[in-house]
Amino acid sequence: MSLVSGPGRGGITDDRLPHELRLFVDKHVCYIQSLDTRKDELEYWLTEHLRLSGLYWGLTALHLLGRPDGLPRNEVLDFVMSCMHDNGGFGAAPGHDAHMLYTISAVQILATLDAFGELEERVGGGRQKIGQYIASLQDTTTGTFAGDEWGETDTRFLYGALNALSLLGLLDLVNINQAVEHIQECANFDGGYGTSPGAESHAGQIFTCVAALSIAGRLDLVDRDKLGGWLSERQLKNGGLNGRPEKKEDVCYSWWVASSLAMIGRLHWIDAEKLTKFILNCQDPELGGFADRPGNMVDVFHTVFGIAGLSLVKYAGLVEVDPVYCMPLAVTKRALGKLK
């Protein structure tokens, strides 16, 4: 029995599959729903700096599992808005400094919940404020973006800026051509991209650069065969994917590698069946959630990217993911379509 379905997808995961090849949807939903109830655990407070991004990861996982109502919408919106600063940026949690990464997560949550109208009701000119905050972090000399007022730059922030601004319909606030030029300066001889010019190729940074080029409409600049070859070599004998040569496999690269291959039309260059089996072997069938590799502790970060990876390879029953945004494709089509 195939682990993946045809073009229609939809429906529920086939319970006739062997236990080790089954996606335990209800367990994963319960795991995500439980995350904000563990306030008596030290780990909850040690991860406060990830709270808003964690909410995006959990919400996206639920939507891909076909359970969009798994978290209370109004409470989610209240929390997101409590993280917003007067300058339009968002912090990881109330009282935390604004940062590009959490601002991106906030925008993605608002888009997923179709809540930009409610943003405007709560904060007049809210969309524009967020856009101006993001635009203020572009380096007008190099075209790249900083994460916050302290100036650290990274292609993650560049991608995030284009991701959020495109969802807001405000790409015109930044210099796209300059950003594209910076990405080209980060390209390497092996077809990959690094965090900055001269940095080694890394699957996570490749995703950010390729996705940013996709949003900018410049995928023509990518050497698809060379990059596809480098990315396909990330698959190990156990089916898992790693981020660079000689490293261990990790469920999160099921997203970073496979989504990049999908964007350049080379996803068929890896073995989807073997990857599917690896991902499913990383889930906790009793308590839910996914770990980085089999037998390790689960977390919401690896949970969303494991589920998104399964969606990319068309595991039966999952909602289709957008390889550029790591959001449900129907959500990005709706959000971007409203701007036309």
Image: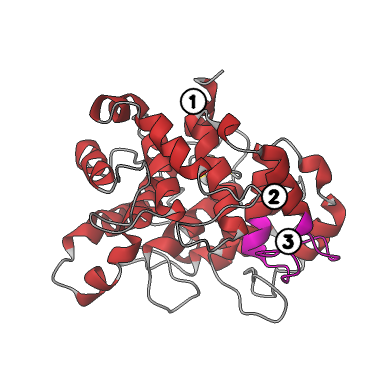
Q: Give the mark, 1 or 3, whose residue is nearer the N terminus.
A: 3
**Which amino acid, by three-letter code, is at mark 1?**
Arg
Residue placed at 52% from the left, 41% from the top?
135
Question: Main SS of the magenta segment?
Answer: loop
Tell me the residue that label 2 is attached to.
Answer: 210
Is residue 7 shown in magenta? no
**Which amino acid, by three-letter code, is at mark 2?**
Val
Tell me the residue that label 3 is attached to.
Answer: 193
Query: In the visual, does 215 lie left or right of 55?
Result: right
* Range of residues picked out in magenta: 185-207
Dot 1 surroundings within 10 Å: few (below 14), some, or many (20 or more)?
some
**Tally of marks:** 3
Q: Between residues 211 and 120, which one lies in front from this camera angle?
A: 120
Residue placed at 21% from the left, 58% from the top?
36
Across and down, in percent, residue 31 comes to 29, 59
Q: Give the mark, 3 or 2, whose residue is nearer the N terminus.
A: 3
Residue 334's disc is 1
Residue placed at 33% from the left, 24% from the top?
117
